[in-house]
Image (spheres, rainbow, N blue to C red):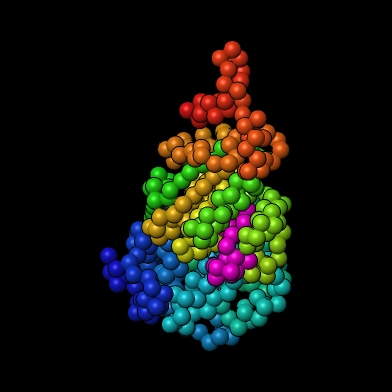
Amino acid sequence: MTFNDLGIIPAVLKALSKENYTAPTPIQEQAIPAVLAGRDLLGCAQTGTGKTAAFAVPIIQLLSEQQSRPITQRRIRSLILTPTRELALQISENIQAYSQYTHLRCSAIVGGVSQKAQERSLNQGADIIIATPGRLIDLMNQKRIDLQYVQILVLDEADRMLDMGFIHDVKKIILKMPSKKQTLFFSATMPPEIAKMVKSLLVNPVKVEITPVSSTVDRIKQSVYLVDKANKQNQLNYLLQDKSIVSALVFTRTKHGADRVVRDLTKVKISAQAIHGNKSQNARQAALSNFKSGETRVLVATDIAARGIDIEELSHVINFNLPNISETYVHRIGRTGRAGLSGIAISLCETEEIPYLKDIEKLIGKTIPEVKDHPYPMLGTTQPLKAEDSSTLAALKPPKSKANPVLKPKSEWFKKGRN
């Protein structure tokens, strides 16, 4: 199937061709005709499935087919709500690309930067706005945004908005829109509160469910290293000595952890930058730009900040910390298996994270292969080891003793723990 088969207008087809879009992904193939037909949509899709174009392309077509208004009378006719600034900016870039041969205008409304530029953009007129809930509510309270003419609402990554505490803000925003509108709802998971929202917002929706977890991870070569917490940084430094790791997105659990990893990588002459909520928007965009261009080899991120990062042909994802939510692991590693491409995902697992590892393996339905031949095996030590200090490593290994079963090698304990 081609985009021509989906009933897309020439102006959008021309833009898609210029952006080197050849054939629609499964979610685009199913969602675009439904949205063009005016139906509400419930999309259950993992990251990297092409869902942005699945809703953006038909929205552009529906709005561009309506009679155009003078700039001074331009109204906001579509609102796309996202959980993070990066995702909002990424969607905005995509919509500008898809709509380049139409008369439509779009604006990104995000926090973390001055609102002056956003005010100017709104004053020039916007048909589509892509917004994070906090900044949108600020501008609504200042009477700078009017949502009474919205025809199409998109809630993207609704489960993440729930995790980040935005659901009450989302409900306030929805109350400012017409009750009769087309709603497109996307969520990778369906916790109870999200399921409740779906029932209250969507009218007889078309449900599109794409890329089950198992097929997402099948494309990606996965491995895990059992490493003491004290040696995780040493292990990461060791892995990154491999020049075949052209670009690596490294995930940490905390913002401070991300900064610490960057400092330690910099000490061993590995170019790295961090991206997380404590960084200014300009700093985050600069770090992302440097990573995309190849100037920075390693980008260290927290899960929330990584939402919206869209990098073509990312070679490696490394979990410095395993997530305690199994679905998050799939989101993370999916960033290196985009659009059907293969990728490599490496995880560093400390003692306290072994239950997370077992949960992840249960979710994906397979055991992640363990790499045992490396300089920093899990020994139960709390002090960092030097890879070259073989005498220290040998001294810390528990002796093999039949007389004292308590002194079984640690590797045997953790092998049993994973089965």
Quarter in which the N terminus is drawn: bottom left
Residue 93 coordinates in the image, percent (x, y): 52, 72
- Nearer to the camera, 133 or 84: 84
Q: What residue do we see at 71% from left, 65% from top?
A: 280
Q: How many marks?
A: 0
Residue 182 coordinates in the image, percent (x, y): 46, 63
Task: Say above or below: 147 vs 335.
Answer: below
Task: Say above or below: 95 vs 249.
Answer: below
Does the image show residue 42?
no
Task: Say above or below: 364 vs 61.
Answer: above
In screen coordinates, is 190 left or right of 24? right
Q: Which residues are magenta?
A: 287-308
Picture quadrant of residue 29:
bottom left
Residue 337 coordinates in the image, percent (x, y): 44, 55
Residue extending farthest to the top is: 403
Picture quadrant of residue 118:
bottom right
- Nearer to the camera, 209 or 89: 89
Q: What residue do we see at 54% from left, 75% from top?
A: 106
Residue 247 coordinates in the image, percent (x, y): 53, 60
- Nearer to the camera, 177 or 298: 298
Q: What residue do we see at 50% from left, 84% from top?
A: 69
- Nearer to the camera, 201 or 87: 87
In screen coordinates, is 211 left or right of 308? left
295 within the magenta span: yes
Q: What residue do we see at 63% from left, 43% from top?
A: 388
Does the image show residue 387?
yes
272 within the magenta span: no
Residue extending farthest to the front is: 391
